[in-house]
């Protein structure tokens, strides 16, 4: 299912995707294949949702304000609360997790005030309190996540 | 950090992904009425000043078979959290590692590390390695697996 080219593209371009007029041609030259093969393989990865996107990855909080937010919502209300939260354009990620705090999402807004307003609105509309966990330090190491790729 | 409006537009235009065409930066430039050179120069500048971390084909861990995505959380001494966080972040299976505030008494954890396993055993093994590294500095810890992805989009700023 995954060709050697697919695997190389997945593993080797988690950083240093070329910033050049013809990045796919550059990759093709690095890997000894054609530009067309690279484009086709990336399209396949993208269609199969094995890559979520190609592009710049932004450092957290470098533009706008963001926070991780947790809520403890009883099972009988979880579905509608989760749906209501996911509908906010400011909410980027929303996960259900196994814990008393069972709803975890990341809210991003253009500034702190807007972020606070969104959180207050969520508390008001859902009737549940939030636990706001902004990032205090980011222990970031510039290494890709090592993927184990079979087929 | 204040970003120029053009830089912000470049970020917003690329958050859905660069188009899969031979000259993707040119395609972005046309949308913004800029030259490809200017778009690339601005991206390069934002990389230098840390706004952009990397340019990546971002793997979708879940679709690649990493079904056990655990948010591991640890209560460690604030005096040691930076040194410990750095070491945890260096582990090859940790994708993100952050310090966050405690919320006492409900939430005593100040160090967060995301792990990704294809099986529960993989994830448990990774957690054991973190626990060993942190050693006696850990007062309490737990892991929260995601049971459902309710929404996931690239970073966007709602203005």
Image: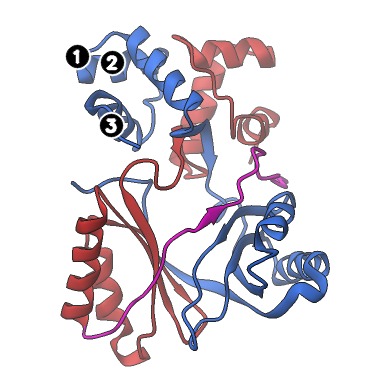
Chain colours: A red, B blue
Query: In percent of the image, x 26 and y 69: which residue is there?
Result: A85
Q: Chain of mark 3?
A: B
Inter-mark Cα distance, 3 to 1: 14 Å
The reply to whether the C-beta atoms of the residues labelled 3 and 1 are less than 8 Å apart is no
Res B33 label:
1
Q: Chain of mark 2?
A: B
The answer to whether residue B151 of the structure is visible from this angle is: no
Q: Chain of mark 1?
A: B
Between label 3 and label 1, give the one nearer the viewer: 3
| Image coords of residue B52 (percent x, y) | 46, 32
Q: Is residue A90 left or right of residue A29?
A: left
Majority secondary structure in the magenta region: loop
Badge 2 marks a residue whose secondary structure is: helix
Q: Is residue A138 magenta?
A: yes
The reply to whether the C-beta atoms of the residues labelled 1 and 2 are less than 8 Å apart is yes
Res B141 label:
none
Segment colored magenta: A127-151
Between label 3 and label 2, give the one nearer the viewer: 3
Badge 1 marks a residue whose secondary structure is: loop
Query: In percent of the image, x 39 and y 41: which residue is there?
Result: A62
* Residue ID for mark 2: B29
* Residue ID for mark 3: B8
**Compared to A42, does A93 lie above or below?**
below
Inter-mark Cα distance, 3 to 2: 13 Å
Q: Is residue A69 left or right of residue B145?
A: left
């Amino acid at each position: 299912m995954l060709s050697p080219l697919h695997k190389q593209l997945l593993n080797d371009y988690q950083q240093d995707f070329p910033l050049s007029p013809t990045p796919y041609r550059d990759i093709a030259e690095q890997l000894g294949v054609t530009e067309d093969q690279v484009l086709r393989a990336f399209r396949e990865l993208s269609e199969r949702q094995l890559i979520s996107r190609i592009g710049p990855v932004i450092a957290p909080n470098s533009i706008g304000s963001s926070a991780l937010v947790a809520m403890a919502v009883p099972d009988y209300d979880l579905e509608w609360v989760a749906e209501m939260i996911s509908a906010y354009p400011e909410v980027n990620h929303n996960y259900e997790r196994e814990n008393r705090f069972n709803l975890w999402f990341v809210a991003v807004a253009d500034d702190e005030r807007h972020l606070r307003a969104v959180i207050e609105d969520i508390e008001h509309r859902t009737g549940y309190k939030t636990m706001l966990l902004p990032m205090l330090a980011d222990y970031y190491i510039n290494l890709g996540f090592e993927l184990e790729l079979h087929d | 950090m204040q970003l120029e409006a053009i830089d912000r537009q470049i970020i917003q235009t690329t958050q859905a992904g660069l188009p899969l065409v031979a000259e993707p930066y040119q395609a972005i430039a046309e949308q913004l009425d800029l030259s490809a050179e200017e778009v690339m120069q601005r991206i390069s500048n934002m990389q230098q000043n840390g706004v952009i971390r990397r340019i990546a084909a971002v793997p979708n861990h879940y679709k690649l078979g990493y079904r056990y995505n655990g948010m591991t959380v640890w209560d460690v001494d604030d005096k040691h959290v930076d040194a410990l966080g750095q070491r945890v972040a260096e582990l090859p299976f940790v994708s993100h590692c952050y310090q966050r505030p405690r919320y006492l008494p409900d939430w005593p954890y100040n160090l967060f590390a995301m792990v990704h396993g294809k099986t529960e055993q993989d994830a448990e093994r990774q957690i054991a390695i973190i626990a060993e590294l942190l050693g006696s500095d850990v007062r309490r810890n737990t892991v929260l697996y995601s049971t459902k992805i309710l929404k996931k989009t690239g970073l966007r700023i709602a203005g």
